[in-house]
C-alpha cells in the first residue's frame, strides 16, 4: 500500500522537524533517565513510576516514527506555488458568513498542519473542501452538523 502524501507549508515543515528533533534529543534522554531512576526503586513489577515512564517512552517512540513517516512523504507548498486567482493549499482566504455577516480569514493547509484555533483549516475539512478551487466572489455551501452555512469568498492571498 502506498503511503499517503503529506502536504505541508514551509512553516509546517519546520514545526514538524523541530518537534522530531526535540523528541529525539531531549525527550528520549529525559525518559531514559526516568526509567533508570524507577528501576533504582527496586521491584519493577509493581512500580508505577516505571510503568508510567515505559508508557511515555512508547508514546514518544510512536510519535517519532509517525513524524519520520510524515516527513518522508512530505510535499512542500512554497509561496510561489500558491495561486491568488483560486483557493489552493497555502492560500489565506477571507470568507464572509452570508447569514451573520462575519468575516473570517482561514489558511488552507494539509491535514498534518491543521489547527482550528489558529484558523488553519485542512483541505479535507468541510470548509476547506468547499472553497478549494473556487474564485474570489464565489458563494459556497458548506454542510456542517448544524446544517448548511453559506460563505462568500472575499479575498485570496498568499
Image: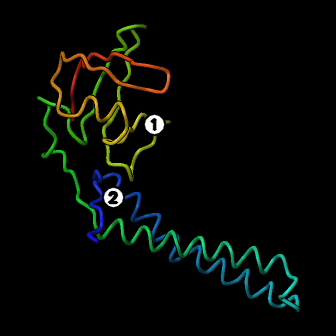
**Residue 82's disc number:** none
Give above or below for 35 relative to 13.
below
Tag 2 residue = 13
Q: How many marks?
A: 2
Quarter of the rendering containing residue 2: bottom left
Residue found at x 37% / y 49%: 111
Residue found at x 50% / y 36%: 117
Tag 1 residue = 118
**Closer to us: 88 or 127:** 127
Circle 1: is it few (<14), some (14-19), or many (20+) Cα within 10 Å? few
In the rendered image, residue 114, in percent from the top left (x then y), is placed at 41, 45
Give above or below for 136 relative to 67.
above
Q: Earlier in the sequence, mark 2 or mark 1?
A: 2
Give above or below for 85 relative to 140.
below
In the rendered image, residue 64, in percent from the top left (x then y), is placed at 48, 72
Kind of element beneath mark 1: helix
Give above or below for 112 relative to 140.
below
Decide if residue 28 is on the left or right side of residue 83: right
Decide if residue 95 is on the left or right side of residue 28: left
Quarter of the rendering containing residue 88: top left
Alpha carbon separation for disc pair 2 and 1:
17 Å
Residue found at x 21% / y 30%: 157
**Closer to us: 105 or 144:** 144
Image quarter hosting the C terminus: top left
Asked whether disc 2 touches disc 1, contact meaning CB atoms under 8 Å apart, the reply is no
Circle 2: is it few (<14), some (14-19), or many (20+) Cα within 10 Å? many
In the rendered image, residue 11, in percent from the top left (x then y), is placed at 33, 51
Residue found at x 88% / y 92%: 42
Amino acid at each position: 500500500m502506498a503511503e499517503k502524501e503529506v502536504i505541508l507549508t514551509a512553516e509546517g515543515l519546520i514545526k514538524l522537524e523541530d518537534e522530531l528533533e526535540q523528541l529525539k534529543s531531549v525527550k528520549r534522554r529525559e525518559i531514559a533517565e526516568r526509567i533508570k531512576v524507577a528501576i533504582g526503586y527496586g521491584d519493577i513489577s509493581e512500580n508505577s513510576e516505571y510503568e508510567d515512564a515505559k508508557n511515555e517512552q512508547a508514546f514518544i517512540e510512536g510519535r517519532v516514527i509517525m513524524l519520520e513517516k510524515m516527513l518522508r512523504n512530505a510535499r512542500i507548498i512554497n509561496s510561489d506555488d500558491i495561486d491568488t486567482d483560486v483557493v489552493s493549499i497555502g492560500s489565506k482566504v477571507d470568507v464572509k458568513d452570508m447569514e451573520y455577516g462575519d468575516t473570517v480569514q482561514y489558511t488552507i493547509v494539509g491535514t498534518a498542519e491543521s489547527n482550528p484555533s489558529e484558523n488553519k483549516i485542512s483541505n479535507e475539512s468541510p470548509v476547506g473542501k468547499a472553497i478549494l478551487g473556487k474564485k474570489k466572489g464565489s458563494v459556497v455551501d458548506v454542510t456542517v452538523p448544524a446544517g448548511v452555512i453559506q460563505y462568500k469568498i472575499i479575498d485570496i492571498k498568499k
